[in-house]
Structure formats: C-alpha cells, structure tokens
Amino acid sequence: MTQAPTLYEKLWDEHFIREAGDGLGLLYVDRHLLHEVSTPQAFEGLKLAGRKVWRIAANLAVADHNVPTSHRDREMTDPLSRLQLQTLDANCAEFGITEFGLHDPRQGIVHVVGPEQGFTLPGMTVVCGDSHTATHGALGALAFGIGTSEVEHVLATQTLVVQKARKMLVRFEGALAEGVGAKDMALALIGLIGTAGGTGHVIEFAGPAVRALSMEGRMTLCNMAIEAGARAGMVAVDDTTIDYCAGRPFAPTGRSLDEAIAYWRSLTSNPGAEFDRVVEITAGRIAPQVTWGTSPEMVTAIDGAVPDPGDEPDSVRRAGILRALEYMGLEPGVRIVDIPLDKVFIGSCTNSRIEDLRMAAAVVRGRRIASGIRQALVVPGSGLVKAQAEAEGLQRVFIEAGFEWHDPGCSMCVGMNEDRLNPGERCASTSNRNFEGRQGAGGRTHLVSPAMAAAAAIAGHFVDVRQFPG
Amino acid sequence: MDKFTLHEGGVVPLDRANVDTDAILPKQFLKSVKRSGFGPHLFDDWRYLDPYREEQDNARRRPNPGFVLNRPEYAGATILLARENFGCGSSREHAPWALKDFGIRALIAPSFADIFFSNCFKNGLLPVRLSAAQVDTLFAQVAARPGYRLCIDLMQQRVTTPSGECFAFEIDAFRRDCLLNGLDEIGLTLQHREQIAAFEKRRLAERSWLNIGAAVARCRLAGDRCGGVEEA
C-alpha cells in the first residue's frame, strides 16, 4: 500500500487475492446482485459446466428491468418477458439464491434495493450485471457493472479479474444553490469532462457539496459515474453513511456493528493521497441542467439554448451534434425553456428514492400537469419506497396533479416493458441515458432532476425550478 | 471460449463517436434468455427503415440503404472500424454477442468503454485500440479503396494494411493469452481455488460483519424455508 492511499486503493488492497498480470488483479467479491436480463445465460453456462455457486449468501436477486409496473395481479401477456422472469425464479430456486419476487414488498430496482436492505455496505466489493452498479459506491464501496460472462465468473468463483483503474478526484467546492441537486452535479460534470472523460478511471466524489448530500443524493451522483465513462464512483464514509446503514435488515447488529463502524470510518482517502486527475467544480455555479442531445454530455443549463453545430471545430463531434439535433427534432439556438414536452418520467435507479419523490412532490403539490402532457409517470424505486411515499401522502399529491402512480421497476428508463415513448415523443426524464431509442424507438429524452421534471410536467415545457413559484 | 490468433478480413467503417450499446443492440431484444440469434438485430434501429415487430419475419423488413452495414461494398466485412468511446452505456453482453453473431471478429477504435471492452474478450472478439490519427488513416483508406482488408495479428500485436503499413497495438498479457489459447477464464481462476478459499476464510473471520448480517437476515426473511446458515 502506498504511503497515503486513496479510498479506491484501500478497497482494492482489501479485496486483492493475487496478481493476474499486467495491472490485473483477482479481486474477492463480497456482494453480487442479480436481475432477470443479464443472468439467464450465466446460469446456463454454470449448469453446462456442472459448476456450483461459490457462496450462496453473497447473492441477492430481484427482477426489475422487464417487470410490469401496473396490473401485477394479471398474468403477463408477453411470453418472452414472462419466460425471462420465470427463468430468474427457477434459477434462484435451483441454486438456493434469495430472490425478492414480483409480489414481495421489497421488490424494486436492484440499485435501490441493495442499499435499502443493507445488503450492500461500506467497504464491500459489489458487482451486478448492470452498469449502474456504480450507485453503491455512495456507501464507500467498490461497486461496478459487469457483463454476463463475468456474472458467471462471480457465481462460480466469488472473484473477478479486474483491471486496476486510474484515480480521479472530483471535488465540488462550496454549496449548491436552492433547487439544484445531485443530478445537476452529475450532469454538469459530464458536460465538462464528456462521456469518455472517466474511461479507465474510478471517480471519488469529494468536497463540501458532496459531504452535504444525503445518501440518496450521493447514490444519484455515483450512479451517473458510468455516464462519465468511469466504471465506478465512490464517496468516502462519514456519519451520513453510517447513520444510513445502521439498522437496515441485512446490516450487522450489536458488537458486529461496532466492529464494522470502526472499520468503515477508515474508508476515506488519506490526506495527501495522489490522484491521476483532479477536477474541481464550484457547486454554487451549477444551474439546473437539461440535456438537449443523444448523449449525456450534450447538456446545458436551464437558461441555455440548443447549440449551433457550426460552432464546433472538430468534424466528428460536429457530425455527432448534427445527428443528435436531427434525431431530437431541435433547431440550433432554441431556448431550453421553449422546448415543449409530451411525457414526463420520474423514476429509475438514478432518481426514484424517497428523497427524489419528496422533491418532485414539493413542486407538484396543489397543481395540475399541463394539458399538453400525454402521460406523466412516477415509478418508485422499490416497494418500500412506494409504501413510504404513500404513508407520507405523496402518491395523493401526484395523482391529484394528474400523474400515474406505478409499481417499482426500471420502467421507462430502459423501455423494456409497456412504459415507453412512441416515435417522436419528447420526454423530461429523471433517468440516466438519453441515447437514441433508449426510452422507446424514436423517443426523445431530456435528462433532468426530479424537481425539474416535476416543474416541466406542470408547465408543459422546461422551466427553471429556482424561479418556479413555490 | 473461441480463439483469436490471426485474422484477415474486410473492414466496415462506422464513422460515429460514442456508439452506445443501446444502439448496438436495442433493449427490445434483451428479453431473450439465450446467447445467440442477436445478429439480425445488430444496430436494429439504424439498419432497418421499418420498426421491429415481434410478429413480423425479420427477413422481410426493409434495410436502410444509407446505413453502412447494408452497403454492398461492405458485405461480409468482419472488422468494424469505429470512433472513440465505442460501446459506452449499458453493460449488456448482448452487444458483443450481436456483433459476433453478425460475423464481426475484431473492432478497431481510438477508445472503447470499459465494460464493453472487457465483455468482448469473453466472446473471442478482439477490440484493438489505435491512436486517433491511425484510425483517421484507416477511415481514409477504407473510403478510398473498395474491397479494403486488414490483417490483425494478435501474437505480434499489429494491424497490417494492404500496402504493408503496420500499426502496433497494446493489450495486456492475460487477455491476450486467453484469446490466443481460447482459455476458459473461470477454469483458470478455479486453478486457484485453495487460495481463494483461504482468502475468503480469513476475510470472513476478520470482517465478521460481512457474514453475520447476511446470514441472520436470510433466516429472518426466508422464515421457515431457511434450514440454517449455508456459509461454508
């Protein structure tokens, strides 16, 4: 270990079993989350090779990508989707893996469920066949997405061959302005460094504005690390982390918890630790962000406008902007606040936790969605988030405003189930990707924070939530 | 796993940066529980003029003549030439499966997204990183010479153009070995079974909180279905 290790180096060393050559290490995996889309082929491979699951208790499964978010009492009509869910059920039953089924109140998006249950905790290595596994880094864990072959590798060996990443520090100095949140921080960062800015790196988020974030906010920030190209994002452990983790169902208790906390407190980068790249951002200067294109780096502030491709000197980038504007049906120079919307989606592993729903509800309360909005959807991240929101009366606020209130799942973020955009439809979405076709073939996605999505639903177009009458 | 040693093949140029895995294989095809059959849907949204409908025979869809994969001069190409940050976004291994199923054996770009890069190797697909200037050169040559082919030699770690120009590329020794020999990575790791077991035993003893919480919760949550703690 170096003299002044970073948080990432501490986590790497803690899980390092052996060299695999050339900067690759065989790392021990503490926790593995499974869902229906990236695991069937892994279980099939395991069975074909006659292999067993190495450590059953390290695994937790929950279907989320392809689950219906309404009418769960009815039989699923799509035979492929039904088979995919049944395959997860059957594999979990065969290998003895704990699964939260579709009717379990704890069912939800893996990256909401893991921390909520205390299944993922500080100091752990956490993997899942989903790129947004970066979310769990908010706990002070090393968490990253893997492919299906790696899912099989983890099931069979409880390890992974991992390339050691370069270290990036992103410091948010000062404090955020009112109405600006973690989603805006993430989008502003991606706008600055680009979607490949973090490639080959692990990002540690630090600085006063990060310390001031709740765990929900930190999860939003780490979740989007992958959108900056970094396989993992992380935040050092502090009281906020420990207060969040203690008392959760899978978290340790009693003396075991005391031991854990004593260790967790060491999960910070040491003073003087060196990073390969440092990015500093003044938090107070971040305005609410809105993407205008088909990559999360195509983003601007709410008071901005759609850019002119003619201003871009690089030819590959210019072609990318032209394609994006054509796909998005936008003209250069159009002000963001003048873009009208068809749909609004509040949900996804980025922004479907209780705090996200509270922020959106605070904007919506006592209002109605604009007449031009065809559908406004709230999809809580888990059954427990949904129950909590209902106990707080948030669902009534949304429903009275004209929103639909759904059961938990990935829903319109990935558009695998019924919740999706039709060709040409324009959506203000709290999700994480505005790629072509992401929310439905031909659909047009603008990424925003929950508060901004809520305000857009009321106004019918984008609006600066900071100036939205409270 | 399939081997990759030396490959010579036609090149198809996809001149776009930040091609994401949603574009490579859109989500409507992720419902399959299989590893094969994704080739006809590679770049589906770009490749066809009419949208995909489950009930329709895919062979009867209208190919988009403007999309590079549909152009006759690139028919049968096995090397995909791309721009920076290829494969960004979702971790879906269905993306390399689709490329492989379509017939692609190697990719050349200035950079690849990390998860996609790693997924390629598990499927006998070689992602080659060359400099942006070298990739520019290749794009220019593909455009200028019909029937353009490249030779990729993994043993020598070099790409050779028809005129004999050579571009060296870097690749880590472990992944190179796995590809050259078609090794099963799980089998390789399990050769260290004792070391992993010893590491795990020590870790779970030193960090007991890793173990107990999960076991207790498992029993609590599973109720009477739980026969006890299954920790080794």
Image (spheres, grey):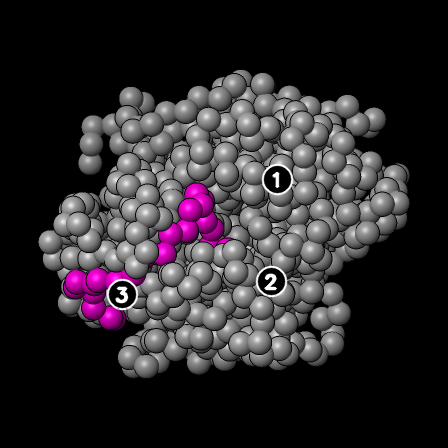
Residue corresponding to mark 2 = B49
As shown in the figure, which amino acid type bears the numbered disc 3? Answer: Gly
Q: Nearer the viewer, mark 3 or mark 2?
A: 2
> Which structural element holds mark 2?
loop
Cα gap from disc 1 to disc 2, whole angstroms: 19 Å
Examine the rendered structure and indicate whether residue A167 appears above or below residue A161: above
Judge depth for marks 1 and 2 and give the one in front: 2
Q: Quadrant of the N terminus of chain A?
A: top left
Label 3 sits on residue: B124
In this view, A11 is above or below B55: above
User: Is A337 on the left or on the right of A236, as rendered?
Assistant: right
Secondary-structure class at tag 3:
loop
Neighbourhood count class around disc 2 (C-alpha, 10 Å): few under 14, some 14–19, many 20 upward: some
On-image quarter of the C terminus of chain A: top right
Question: For this rendering, which residue is in front, A323 or A226?
Answer: A323
Are the numbered discs 3 and 2 placed on the same chain, yes or no? yes
Let me know if marks 3 and 1 both belong to one chain.
Answer: no
Q: Position of residue B117 (x, y in %)?
A: 33, 53
